[in-house]
Amino acid sequence: MHVNGLIRELPKAELHLHIEGTLEPEMMFEMALRNGVELPYPNVEAVRAAYQFTDLQSFLDIYYQGAAVLRTEDDFADLMAGYVERAIADGVTRAEVFFDPQIHTERGVSFETMIDGFARTRRAYAGRIDTDLILCFLRHLPEESALATLAMAEPHLDQIIAVGLDSSEVGHPPEDFARVFARARAMGLRAVAHAGEEGPPEYVWGALDALGAERIDHGVRALEDPDLVQRLVEEQIPLTVCPQSNLKLKVVSHLGEHPLKRMLDLGLNVSINSDDPAYFGAYIADNYQQVAGALGLGAEEITRLARNSIESSFAVT
């Protein structure tokens, strides 16, 4: 079978996906219209034209702006449905989906509105795809805000499998969130964290040791520290890599220089994921296909990446 055909056929898990990052411009305009939200763009084409990012922060500015159209339970249900339809078509059998409550609660949207909307869609698709939610804390906000968000989540822990840490990385080390992660783990939640995307390898050490992270989201800059690489290989800590995200946010200048193949060759436990596919123009199968073409990955490597994703999911570990 040709590699591209194999990619869609292989069962795979998506472990690094922000649900707000699946908000396609068409859906953004539809929700803005029904909720009476004024967008700073005249049409869908203007929104897509704005998706030219220079770094992580330039992306986040637009990402938060777009999320402002999400207001009702129906909005969150529709957002989740749009993603899972695409994921199923790409061969995803398991998705552990990030959501960012603080983006919404700061605008007056209740935690229940989000969680109930997501739950409605998750139930509707339960026979076709297995999904769980990961509550991410925004690292550019103080830990007190994260602690308050965790308290909001407590009545809904049956809907949430883990906590994570995302948003602007540089200048916001993992150690700043040690208390909230300790509290979350004590409540029975698993832990993941973004680290080593724009931030230095020290942030990966911090995510592992200060936060107890069981998976590292991105982690590409870990390669700069041989001792860290050795630890990641020995402990087989999963790294949820997002090639098109790294390209669009200028972590790499072209996919041919992406370190994914080197990471595989070193024995690191890496998987391919789509991060914020509506903004980066590539869902999970696109990420597999594009990086496979750029790096010359064969069927054996593609199969290994898919197997890594399944084995690194919280449904297995």
Image: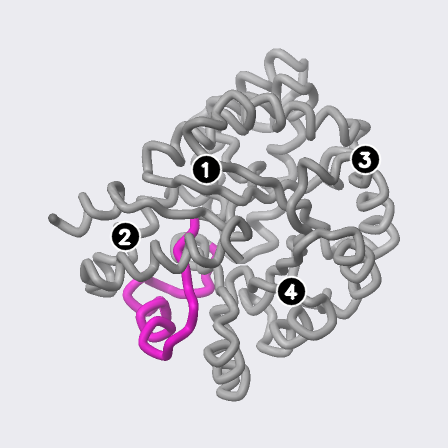
Q: How is the image coloured?
A: one colour
Q: Which residue is mark 2?
A: 290
Closer to the camera: disc 3 or disc 1? 3
Which badge, 1 or 4, is on the more N-terminal residue? 4
The three-letter amino acid code for the residue at tag 4 is Ala
Estimate how packed mark 2 is, as few (under 14), some (14 to 19) or many (20 or more) residues with alpha carbons within 10 Å.
some
Nearer-the-camera pick, 112 or 196: 112
Q: Is residue 206 above or below residue 123?
A: below
Residue range (magenta): 249-273
Residue 194 on the magenta segment: no
Which badge, 4 or 3, is on the more N-terminal residue? 3
Q: Quadrant of residue 201?
A: bottom right
**Proximity of marks 4 and 3: CB atoms separated by less than 8 Å:** no
> Which disc is residue 238 wearing?
none
The three-letter amino acid code for the residue at tag 3 is Pro
Indicate the position of residue 76 as horizontal and vertical percent values.
62, 25
Indicate the position of residue 244 as horizontal and vertical percent values.
39, 53
State how far apart marks 1 and 4 are (Cα).
Answer: 27 Å
